Amino acid sequence: MLKRTHTCGALRAGDAGKETVLNGWVGSARDHGGLVFINIRDRYGVTQAVFDPAESPDLMNTAKMLHGEDVIALKGTVRQRPGEQANRNMPTGEIEVLAKELILLNRAKTPPFEIEDETTAAEELRLKYRYLDLRRPALQNILMLRHKTAQLTRQYLSGEGFLEVETPMLTKSTPEGARDYLVPSRVSKGHFYALPQSPQLFKQLLMVAGFDRYFQIVKCFRDEDLRTDRQPEFTQIDIEASFIDREDIYKTMEGLVSLLWKELKGVSFKVPFDRLSYAEAMERFGSDRPDRRIPWELVTVTDIFKNSSFKAFAGAVENGGIVKAVEMTGMAERFSRKEVDLAGEFVKTYGARGDASLKGIEKFLTSNEVPALKERLGISDKDTVLFVADKPKTVNDALGALRVELGKKFKTFDADSIDVLWVTDFPLMEKDEKEGRYVSLHHPFTSPDPSDIGLLDSNPSKAKALAYDCVINGSEIGGGSIRIHDRNVQQKIFDLLKISREEAKKRFGFLLEALEFGAPPHGGIAFGLDRIVMLLAGTDSIRDVIAFPKTTSASCLMTDAPSDVDKTQLKELGIELK
Ligand code: ASP
């Protein structure tokens, strides 16, 4: 065997004259003016090898028989390419290896698609042959970036005194708002483990155990409807600490985010990050994860339409609705009548009845309504304004999403710019109209703001939580809270969420009990590792940053999971299929 002396990304002009052995996969082979050129690829790069009949006609003939993706070992001499033949786009482009010996280590069948960064192969095919897809340099680079992200995270947190502790995968349900993946028990038939939606309860118990600063890079499992930025199993950078307040969490995470972007992208962030209260984010952007790179904001104009002769809006206000506008500066010339209609279709998918442009409704408004609007919105004839009138949540959802949709469509910001901020002071709970009860915005272990404790009795939905999210470019990359460490407050929250004492005991009894054995004040946060790597890599598919991802219907096209199992296996588990 020819054992490699260099990787395929290592050789430079300074190596000219050296003997080298490369191992790798055959990329393109080209026949050129009597010479054969072959690219050899490994995860470090690509090197060009040249076979010259003047050196060895046999060797050249063997080279001609090679197929793409064959695995070879090649021995040769490094030589500098003459000036005009150097390839500046390739790190090894100044040299080539003049082949002296070639061993075919393994033949490859013709791959179902070409292993190239610019691929047109269907994603289903690439997922089925994921190991071939992963040979593409673009994906190799992303997984290397992911590795570096994880390593830097470990180094940084360890340096800050955080201990990495593993928590169980076969466990009890953790409420993070999704469905559980269940695992049947063979030993206790009819009983099930749940895969963790997060290590939330265990990390709190580690605080009770005195570990003080915990972290873990950990898989979490949530059975929910998938989107391009969601996978049924994903990875969190999970953190918990004792005797701290929100400021400590902000500082720790700002340090981590700044380090990652500095080391991996050469970008410096201004710290501390901006902070926006939930209320302000909703008011100005209609979203709790605002993308402030888009220069437009929402403005409430309910009062102006209250008694308007424009009946559609006045009626919405009368029914308890609101009217908000998105003010699109300088867009008058670019925003056609057709765009207004398209926007109308768009807001309908958010349940809003439609939108209206100022131009479109001006004729229905009175002579003092128009100037009042213009003044409130601070607009001129160069600007475009769209309105939505409906229930407050519908207006914010629809107009907030429309702002992002149009802001991106009309390229209103520099694609390389980065917007990072904290959204703080979330409401503790909100009323689920369908179920007629309160639900936690984060999870039921989140501490109310101490100054709002009184509101828990009088007006729970007004109480704020000590909860925070970190948002980058309109994507929530992490969230957490200061926790409840007082047994009685925790009980009160369960009562408000209509989790009965019996149910609370059954589901979280171990936590409630632990709170009575000297639980320190504590809090934490979890960042989505996949989303961070997505942002660092500049890709918009979460599947690009996971070695073996699942499809949006939660299946793995390579292994065929989930699949049926042996009857005997089911029998052992005491399960019968209907
Ligand atoms: N467990 C939470 C989550 O997974 C994060 C936290 O509160 O620390 O979203």
Image (cartoon, rainbow, N blue to C red):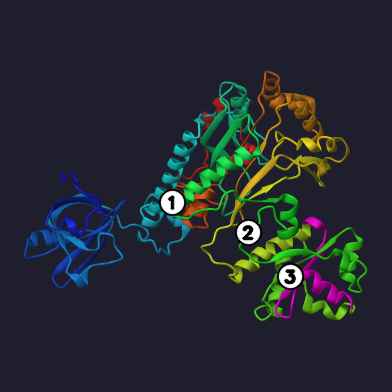
Q: Which mark is residue 264?
A: 1
Q: Identify the residue at horizontal 63%, vertical 59% (top origin).
A: 291
Measure the alpha-carbon separation of dots 3 and 1: 41 Å
Look at discs 2 and 3 and give the one toward the viewer. 2
Ligand 1 location (quadrant):
top right
Q: Are marks 3 and 1 in contact (CB under 8 Å)?
A: no
Q: Which residue matches tag 3?
A: 344
Whether residue 550 is visible here, answered yes or no, is no
Local packing at callout 2 (Cα closer than 10 Å; few below 14, some 14-19, many 20+) is many
Q: Identify the residue at horizontal 54%, vertical 25% (top origin).
A: 572
Find residue 442 and report its horizontal and vertical position in percent: 69, 41
Find residue 325 and report its horizontal and vertical position in percent: 77, 67
Quadrant hosting residue 504 = top right
Q: Is residue 275 magenta?
A: no
Whether disc 1's CB lies below 8 Å from ligand 1 is answered no
Measure the alpha-carbon separation of dots 2 and 3: 22 Å
Local packing at callout 3 (Cα closer than 10 Å; few below 14, some 14-19, many 20+) is many
Quadrant hosting residue 386 = bottom right
Q: Is residue 382 magenta?
A: yes
Q: What amino acid is at disc 1? A: Leu
